[in-house]
Image (spheres, rainbow, N blue to C red):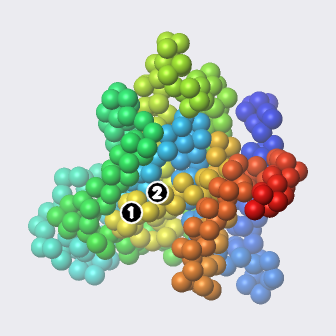
Amino acid sequence: MFFSSVLNKDRGGTITLSVLFFIAIIVPFCNLVLPNSHPLHIDTFTVSLLGKYLSYALLALAVDLVWGYLGILSLGHGAFFALGGYAMGMYLMRQIGDRGVYGDPILADFMVFLNWQSLPWFWQGFDQFWFACLMVIIIPGALAYLFGRLAFRSRVSGVYLSIMTQALTYALMLAFFRNEMGFGGNNGLTDFKEILGFSLQHDTTKVMLFVCSALMLIIAYIVCKVLINSRLGRVAIAIRDTELRTRFMGYDVDNIKLWIFVLSAVIAGIAGALYVPQVGIINPGEFSPLNSIEVVVWVALGGRATLFGAIIGAIIINYAKSWFTVVLPEVWLFALGSLFVLSTLYLPQGVTGLFNHSPKIVRGWIKRGFKT
């Protein structure tokens, strides 16, 4: 009853969640139960790759929430993603113990290399999984709250707000590159051994991380959908379309924008936390503004203001990236740029719009063809 009310008139979302639930069951079966010689067997590398795609899809969902339904084009969500990843990476580093290169039971290898004598205060508590999970939520959320409170109270919007979000993630990237920050500098955090006592190299652990990514994506989608279907969501859409009129009607526009922005940042942080143990590394490169811009491309290609379109766009583009970087690595950036330009010109509603309005879109293509 709950799901039917949440997903009412959301055929695309219903199909997407059904597929996610299906692969959350079939992929572990094909990896753990079917023998390697079976034609339907899915190897562990592919499982980890799919898990990475789902983490990216969760990040795209966060961006679509603020861009598609609130009108905030954030070019800095990679910062929240990376902060969540670093929080989880710090926990994983504390689990290495004396199995590191230098054998120190407390200090990470890069700390020993830099001749640090004690564990920095901000690393305290990260030996506990619950504390790391708490920080995955609190750190991105707190940063989004501080940034959003300053920006929205100052009535910064449009391209100026986008530039500010981009500057935020760029500043964090420069800071995390510094060794004295205490996060591994240029090399970041890597060489993880285990999570909750389970080896990260074991097939079962990788499968469970994949399942967690799929389930978290489903939960986040439902949370976002409940928000959008609520009165708060309708006000958010009104802010996106006519902010000034919504403000004149008496709504607290600044607070609505702030808390939805914070929720989006928390979702991005969770995506980063799921990404790190599956990939095995987190470094300052994840803060790169180019990564945040790429996420916007995922959402634009999939279909803005649909939620499920962001998921589809993230998976399509990252699969294409995996294929291009192996077969034609020198043309990947050109292919990505071409996808964005073509989708803007011919698929303004993204791939999902093609299915919803395909006859109308085809007629538009024909008219453009005749005009040219």
Quadrant into which the N terminus falls: top right
Pick out the residue farthest to the front: 371
Any mark on residue 288, and which? 1
Q: Report helix, strand or loop for mark 2.
A: helix
Residue annotated with mark 2: 292
Q: Where is residue 152 shown, x and y percent of the image?
A: 38, 31
| In front of the other: 223 or 100 | 223
Disc 1 is placed on an element classified as loop
Q: Residue at x 82, y 60 (%)?
A: 370
Q: Is residue 62 above or below residue 49?
A: above
What residue is at 11 percent from the left and 67 percent from the top? 117
**What type is the residue that disc 2 sits on?**
Ser
- Residues under labels 1 and 2: Cα distance? 7 Å
Q: Position of residue 320 (x, y in %)?
A: 64, 72
Circles 1, 2 touching at the beta carbon (< 8 Å): yes
Q: Residues within 10 Å of mark 2 (few under 14, many from 20)?
A: many
